[in-house]
Amino acid sequence: MGKAKALSARTPASTRSTLVGYRLHADTTGVIRPSTCAGFVRALVIVDDASRWTFVTLLSSVTMLEVC
């Protein structure tokens, strides 16, 4: 009986996209406390699956998600 090994939490490369911009993952973060100087309290995070490029835009309210 050998030592137990933890499974990787990363997505296997065979299921990842190979084309930049083909598969994007988006998520919003909760309320940021304290808010920024400009009054932003939330963030929209978009990650490209192929390049792992990350884009973050700050939001002042949840209703700004409808504009994005």
Image: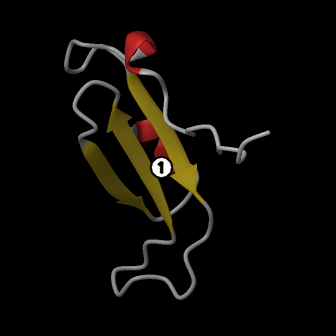
Image location (x, y in percent) of residue 58: 37, 61
Image location (x, y in percent) of residue 44: 44, 50
Relative to residue 22, is residue 46 depicted above or below? below
Q: Residues within 10 Å of mark 1 (few under 14, many from 20)?
A: few
Q: Residue at x 33, y 55 (%)?
A: 57
Quadrant for residue 15, please give it.
Answer: top left
Relative to residue 19, is residue 37 depicted above or below? below
Q: Residue at x 80, y 39 (%)?
A: 1
From the viewer's side, name the closer residue of 50 and 63.
50
Relative to residue 61, is residue 67 depicted above or below? above
Q: Residue at x 36, y 18 (%)?
A: 23
Disc 1 secondary structure class = helix
Relative to residue 54, is residue 42 depicted above or below? below
Amino acid type at circle 1 is Met
Image location (x, y in percent) of residue 2: 72, 42
Residue wearing tag 1 = 64
> Most extreme residue toward the front, as rendered?
1
From the viewer's side, name the closer residue of 50 and 55.
50
In this picture the colour scheme is secondary structure
